[in-house]
Image (tube, rainbow, N blue to C red):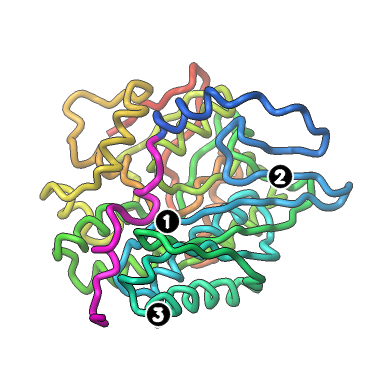
């Protein structure tokens, strides 16, 4: 069995670009029966939040999530690291502290060396270790395509929980990681991603969003989510709909990973970006002449993307400084929540 297998060649898609499109997901969930009310269920599936939350007592709430996908890079160790970082992000995006993880493993055993599979798990466990989280078990199957991810559990004080639905009119929106992971992954598959771009891809996707824990309880921080498969526009729209507000995105201030603009201008994009736009484009107003490559970047699926923070305008400078001190050097104010029907207006 060859040892130089390209991991990405074993899957039809990769990273958070594998997610069902927002439109398909809405259609599926629309037919689901309404769950009976549970007094301790603080967050369920009703607002497309990052995790479910169950109140344990007056001091603790349990945050639970699961996230898994197919390879976004060829190095198995790095794939494991990226997938684990991405899964833990859902816990941080609720303002919670992760406490436990379980591995989700589906591998084409006959097509991959056992050591390659082992390296994926080792990579994931290394990230969990750095986050102070044990991988205490899991489940594995023999599948046609490689799949890896985590079930992740965390704890948060019920009064300090952050969700994607509690933004307020006038809040500014801060994005903590630059966009372009999906474009990078498409370029990688086409052998068009240079060494600088690959290094930036790994650095961004393996940086834990531990900032979320620090934001819990910070004065003026009203809502929080992470930007993943639906792109910046999709997750901003979820935040706007959850709050019953409209949003504006200042495209000129949205940070991008190095070289992403050049790749996007040259037509590098993911199929998921197009599916994202088809799913929610009717809720987005773009200025006349807005370039297609910019739209692709705003719809680009982010694997292990940054946090999107809705914060009171007076507190925004201090929260932005907090993010930068935490190592998110390209953090930027990219928009705001405003009054109006849920939707997004792009400012060039």
Query: Is there CB contact under 8 Å for labels 3 and 1?
Result: no
Left or right of 27 in this view: 288: left
Residue 291 vertical position relative to residue 339 in the rendered view, above or below: below
Q: Quadrant of the C terminus?
A: top left
Q: Which residue is mark 1?
A: 69
Query: Is there CB contact under 8 Å for labels 3 and 2?
Result: no
**Mark 3: few/some/many CA within 10 Å (<14, 14-19, 20+):** few
Nearest-to-viewer mark from 2 and 1: 1
Q: Which residue is mark 3?
A: 114
Residue 53 badge: 2
Q: Is residue 86 magenta?
A: no
Q: Main secondary structure of the magenta part?
A: loop
Left or right of 123 in this view: 170: right
How far apart marks 3 and 1 lie (CA) works out to 19 Å
Q: Position of residue 172 (x, y in %)?
A: 51, 38
* Nearer-N-terminus badge (3/2): 2
How far apart marks 2 and 1 lie (CA) works out to 23 Å
* Nearer-N-terminus badge (3/1): 1
Q: Which residues are magenta?
A: 1-21
Which quadrant would residue 20 be assigned to in this image?
top left
């Amino acid at each position: 069995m060859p040892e130089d297998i390209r991991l990405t060649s074993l899957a039809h898609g990769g990273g958070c670009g594998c997610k069902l499109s927002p439109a398909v997901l809405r259609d599926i969930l629309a037919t689901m029966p309404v769950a009976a009310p549970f007094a301790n269920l603080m967050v369920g599936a009703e607002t497309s939040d990052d995790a479910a939350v169950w109140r344990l007592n007056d001091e603790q709430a349990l945050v639970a999530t699961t996230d898994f996908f197919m390879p976004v890079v060829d190095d198995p160790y790095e794939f494991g690291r990226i997938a684990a970082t991405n899964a833990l992000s859902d816990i941080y995006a609720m303002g919670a502290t992760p406490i436990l993880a379980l591995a989700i493993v589906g591998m084409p055993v006959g097509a991959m060396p056992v050591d390659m599979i082992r390296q994926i798990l080792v990579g994931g466990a290394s990230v969990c270790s750095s986050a102070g989280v044990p991988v205490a078990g899991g489940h594995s199957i023999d599948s046609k395509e490689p799949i890896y991810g985590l079930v992740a559990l965390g704890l948060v004080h019920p009064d300090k929980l952050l969700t994607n639905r509690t933004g307020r009119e006038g809040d500014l929106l801060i994005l903590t990681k630059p966009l372009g992971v999906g474009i990078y992954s498409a370029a990688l598959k086409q052998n068009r991603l240079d060494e600088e771009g690959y290094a930036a891809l790994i650095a961004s996707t393996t940086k834990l969003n531990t900032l979320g824990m620090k934001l819990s309880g910070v004065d003026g921080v009203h809502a929080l989510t992470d930007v993943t498969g639906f792109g910046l526009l999709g997750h901003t729209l979820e935040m706007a709909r959850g709050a019953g507000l409209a949003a504006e995105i200042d495209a000129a201030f949205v940070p991008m990973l190095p070289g992403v603009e050049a790749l996007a201008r040259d037509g590098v994009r993911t199929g998921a970006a197009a599916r994202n736009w088809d799913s929610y484009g009717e809720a987005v107003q773009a200025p006349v002449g807005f370039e297609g490559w910019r739209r692709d970047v705003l719809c680009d699926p982010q694997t292990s993307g940054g946090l999107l923070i809705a914060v009171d305008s007076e507190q925004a400078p201090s929260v932005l400084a907090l993010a930068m001190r935490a190592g998110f050097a390209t953090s930027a104010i990219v928009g705001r929540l405003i009054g109006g029907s849920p939707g997004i207006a792009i400012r060039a």
